[in-house]
Image (tube, rainbow, N blue to C red):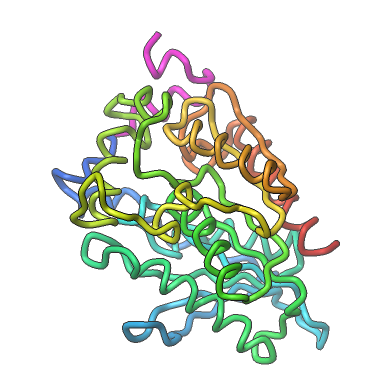
Amino acid sequence: MDFENRLLPELRSVIAQFPGFQLEENLELSRSYLSSPPIEQSEHVRTTSRMIPSVAGEILVKIYEPAQRTDVRLPAMLWIHGGGYVMGHPDMDDALCERFVQAAKCVVVSVDYRLAPEHPYPAAIDDCYAALTWMTDEAELLGIDLDRIAIAGASGGGGLTAALALMARDKGGPALIFQMPLYPMIDDRSITASSHEITADNAPWNRTNNLAAWNMYLGDRTEDSEVSPYAVPSRAENLAGLPPTYTCVGQLDLFRDETIEYTTRLVQAGVDVEFHLYPGTFHNFEGMVPQAEVSQLASQSYVDAIARALNP
């Protein structure tokens, strides 16, 4: 049975019209697919932008917080947008970040990290770590509670979330109480069954694009090259000591098997994990078809997970 026929009926019409990414043929066109018109901002959330220091100069962060603040320090989350390490911008997640703020009564900082191939590894993770340390160093300015800091992201942003959790653990901070790598891009080896299974041109993320994106991110390497777990989290030998974790993935997502393996290894390392597998769904289904019943179920589940984690 082909890819489209395996999908839930409520998702098929969108996939039938999706042109598919062509990263190697036209990266700029592919990047344009992730641009979105400005949202109508919620009156309950205040959004500001500012430049902060990173390894190679300044980077943009967007800060979302309740419009009506008191002196009470709020929990905070660093959000890392998706795009396979080669696409995306914080603007595309404005509505989701507003939703996190309202559900979890928190501050969200969304980081505009540098993209490959113009800026291969370690640019993106360096920027994410710089944003996390800036958040915690500026706790007074942001009015956040350092005992309630989480990180989260989807797809490539999920991979950076997993990598950032490893880096924060290994560097001795900042302290995290939760990580939420959603359907994360965490294994460059592309040897799982699901990495071979999703090949349709109109699949939101297929094998061809996955191989191309990893090559852009990691640059020139051979089979014998040593790859850092901060670049490829699945290569981490030790997952002990990571924060409690929430993750999910679609059954027809190329990242299905690497997410399941990562989840299993976290559990075996003594990390508390909540995991959801959604049958009949593709990569980023809840972002592409937000009105579908399964999409609303999935997004509400992870929004609720953040709210619970940040308000124990």
Magenta region's main secondary structure?
A: helix
Tell me if residue 272 comes above or below residue 100 in the rendering: above
Q: Is residue 47 above or below residue 196?
A: below
Residue at the limit of the structure toward the bottom, as seen here: 140
**Residue at 64% across / 46% down in the picture?**
266
Q: Closer to the camera, 230 or 284?
A: 230
User: Residue 216: x, y in percent?
Assistant: 23, 54
Q: Position of residue 182 (x, y in %)?
A: 56, 47
- Between 169 and 129, the residue placed more toward the observer is 169
Give the image location of residue 245, x and y in percent: 68, 51
Residue at image position (71%, 50%) is: 271
Residue at the (24%, 44%) spot, across then down: 223
- Residue sitting farthest toward the top: 1
**Is 134 above or below relative to 40?**
below
Residue 19 occupies which quadrant of the picture? Answer: top left
Q: Which residues are magenta?
A: 1-19
Q: Is residue 300 visible?
A: no
Asked if residue 16 is among those painted magenta in the image, a careful observer would answer yes
The verdict on residue 74 being magenta is no
Frontmost residue, 76 versus 10: 76
Residue 299, compared with residue 238, is above or below; it is above
Q: Is residue 311 visible?
A: yes
